[in-house]
């Protein structure tokens, strides 16, 4: 059995897409997954099971839709992927305030044409920076994520894929919950 980290996009923000974490755990367990645990209230689930990451995501999405009546994108990473993400940040070892570093997880690897839509002067976002590595975008936002233009909508519009973002502290906590030793 493999371990997975599932991240739901845009739940429990205001009154929209409300899902209680005990209900989410029960729903994921009802799909036959084991060792299900959640982290925070923003739709982070660590679980064990079988299948590809995309199959796990599709089964959770379908269950949320059929059981709760919500259309919520789910992005899943394996422990191997989480190990790569936490161990190879292009910003080196994350130092200082981890709230300034984020990872935007993409549902698919963007193609070359989509990546060209991100091109532009390196200073167009002020001090904010990003680097796309496969299915993930590493962000450094010294002014805070709430103030950056490098949000989910920015990447979704330009890359044409669903995205969800977690701060570095959440990324490492989820990796550790999945059994990944983090730096």
Image (spheres, rainbow, N blue to C red):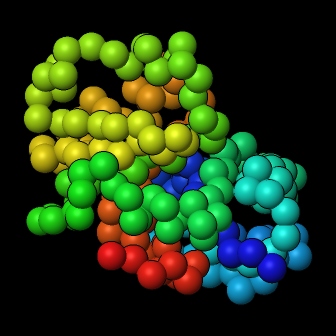
- Measuring from the top left, give residue 74's x and y in whole percent: 66, 51
Q: Nearer the viewer, residue 85 or 13?
A: 85
**Is residue 10 rendered to the left or right of residue 117?**
right
When the figure is inspected, residue 101 is found, relative to residue 19, above or below; the finding is: above
Q: Identify the image quadrant of the N terminus.
A: bottom right
- Measuring from the top left, give residue 20's x and y in whole percent: 61, 70
Q: Quadrant of residue 25?
A: bottom right
Q: Nearer the viewer, residue 38 or 104?
A: 104
When the figure is inspected, residue 159 is found, relative to residue 15, above or below; the finding is: above
Q: Identify the image quadrant of the C terminus.
A: bottom left
Residue drawn at 52 percent across, 64 percent down: 82
Q: Is residue 25 visible?
A: no
**Is residue 18 rendered to the left or right of residue 145?**
right
- Measuring from the top left, give residue 96's x and y in whole percent: 12, 65
**Is residue 51 rendered to the left or right of residue 14?**
right
Residue drawn at 60 percent across, 70 percent down: 79
- Measuring from the top left, give residue 66's x and y in whole percent: 87, 52
């Amino acid at each position: 059995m493999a371990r997975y980290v599932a991240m739901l996009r845009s739940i429990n923000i205001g009154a929209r897409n409300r899902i209680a974490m005990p209900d989410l755990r029960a729903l994921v367990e009802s799909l036959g997954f084991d060792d299900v645990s959640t982290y925070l209230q923003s739709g982070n689930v660590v679980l064990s099971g079988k299948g590809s990451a995309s199959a796990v995501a599709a089964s959770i999405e379908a269950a949320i839709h059929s059981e709760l009546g919500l259309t919520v994108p789910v992005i899943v990473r394996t422990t191997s992927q989480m190990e790569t993400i936490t161990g190879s940040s292009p910003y080196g070892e994350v130092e200082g305030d981890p709230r300034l570093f984020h990872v935007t997880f993409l549902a698919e690897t963007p193609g070359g044409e989509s990546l060209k839509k991100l091109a532009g002067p390196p200073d167009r976002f002020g001090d904010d920076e990003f680097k796309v590595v496969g299915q993930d975008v590493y962000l450094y936002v010294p002014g805070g994520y709430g103030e950056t233009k490098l949000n989910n909508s920015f990447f979704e519009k330009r890359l044409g894929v669903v995205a969800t973002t977690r701060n570095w502290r959440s990324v490492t906590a989820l990796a550790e919950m999945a059994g990944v030793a983090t730096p």
